[in-house]
Image: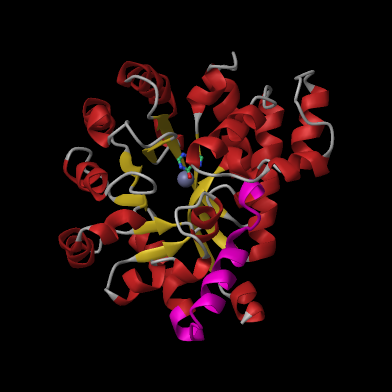
């Protein structure tokens, strides 16, 4: 199975670039940029990666992201992930970035995006990995800040395929961002949102009804509402599920109690993704393998998961066909 998964052509749809910051690169950039970190070794950093919930993770994730300062830093971060894609046989990836995280650290929007888009272009040209860029709004900040961020993105309209919503979910329902998502759609951006990771099924309904999203990121709490599961299956609205992330953040106690296969068998278009692999201890192949082993999947079922991601991607119909 391990060999089968490694060789399977794959697509990733839920990946935070800042979440691919490996401890080695974090420490190197902290030194390069003179940013103080409360950790001095790879071992002490890795030892700190034990999380009780999303909030505990986000604290370390934002602390780590503060070492990213220059365009070259964003290039290096992004290119290192694309090299990993090449090794894992990921042919296409749709990646998130959080510009507000960096503007809070005094890093300009242009610095962040120029580094990322240069790496994405090189990744396609030199590694053969195609990509799409998704700009996420931080949901724990006011909608006005998201609107300001959207305005900055207008001049990069051709470089960004979609907008998304991430960060602390509880207490920050999708509805809070209804206006900015409408503006984004009117500008021609596609839309996705994190919903139902820690938040209730109601937030998934809101993401669908108030934000008009084309995919739900995580969405695993849909199981609390059978009508919602039926809706997702009927409309083939994709979920970008991140199994190892959900276990690390205690959304599920262990991989065996994860609901991804239950949803799969209920006809929901589920996909497997890695979320923040540098923090959660596994890239895409590890996530596939964990699920395949825990549920004793057949090769055909594993291949179906990969097929689902191709279908759920924002690629053209023509390119989807090439990948299938
Ligand atoms: N959930 C919400 N926000 C995030 C995540 C996540 O899994 N990863 C990075 N930002
Ligand atoms: Zn995520």
Task: Give the residues in magenta.
Answer: 278-301
Q: Residue at x 25, y 43 (%)?
A: 203
How far from the left and from the top, in percent, is residue 7? 62, 75
Q: What colour scheme has been applied to the protein in the rendered image? A: secondary structure
**As drawn, 122 above or below 165:** below
How far from the left and from the top, in percent, is residue 282? 64, 58
Q: Nearer the viewer, residue 78 or 193?
A: 193
**As drawn, 321 above or below 127:** below
How far from the left and from the top, in percent, is residue 150? 36, 24
How far from the left and from the top, in percent, is residue 86? 66, 60
- Is 283 magenta? The answer is yes
Q: Quadrant of the N terminus?
A: bottom right
Q: Residue at x 32, y 55 (%)?
A: 221
**As drawn, 175 above or below 121:** above
Q: Residue at x 26, y 32 (%)?
A: 181
**As drawn, 297 above or below 272:** below
Magenta span dominant secondary structure: helix
């Amino acid at each position: 199975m391990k060999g089968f998964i490694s060789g399977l052509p794959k697509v990733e749809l839920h990946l935070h670039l800042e979440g691919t910051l490996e401890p080695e690169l974090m420490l190197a950039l902290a030194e390069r940029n003179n940013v103080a970190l409360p950790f001095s070794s790879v071992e002490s950093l890795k030892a700190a990666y034990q999380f009780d919930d999303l909030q505990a993770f986000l604290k370390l994730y934002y602390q780590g992201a503060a070492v990213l300062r220059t365009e070259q830093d964003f290039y290096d971060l992004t290119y290192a992930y694309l090299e990993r894609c090449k090794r894992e046989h990921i042919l296409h990836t749709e990646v998130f970035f959080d510009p507000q995280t960096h503007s809070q650290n005094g890093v300009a929007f242009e610095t962040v995006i120029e580094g990322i888009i240069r790496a994405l272009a090189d990744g396609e040209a030199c590694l053969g990995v195609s990509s799409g860029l998704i700009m996420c709004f931080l949901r724990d900040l006011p909608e006005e800040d998201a609107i300001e961020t959207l305005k900055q993105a207008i001049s990069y309209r051709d470089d960004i395929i979609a907008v998304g919503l991430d960060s602390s979910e509880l207490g920050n329902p999708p509805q809070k961002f209804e206006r900015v998502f409408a503006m984004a759609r009117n500008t021609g951006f596609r839309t996705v949102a994190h919903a139902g990771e820690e938040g209730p099924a109601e937030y998934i309904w809101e993401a669908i009804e108030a934000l008009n999203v084309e995919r739900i990121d995580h969405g695993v709490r849909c199981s609390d509402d059978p009508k919602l599961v039926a809706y997702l299956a009927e409309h083939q609205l994709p979920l970008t599920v991140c199994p190892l992330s959900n276990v690390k953040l205690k959304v599920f106690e262990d991989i065996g109690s994860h609901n991804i296969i239950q949803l799969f068998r209920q006809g929901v278009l589920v996909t497997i993704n890695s979320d923040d692999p540098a923090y959660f201890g596994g890239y895409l192949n590890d996530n596939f393998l964990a699920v395949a082993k825990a549920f004793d999947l057949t090769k055909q079922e594993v291949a179906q998961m990969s097929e689902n991601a191709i279908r759920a991607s924002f690629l053209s119909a023509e390119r989807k066909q090439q990948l299938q």
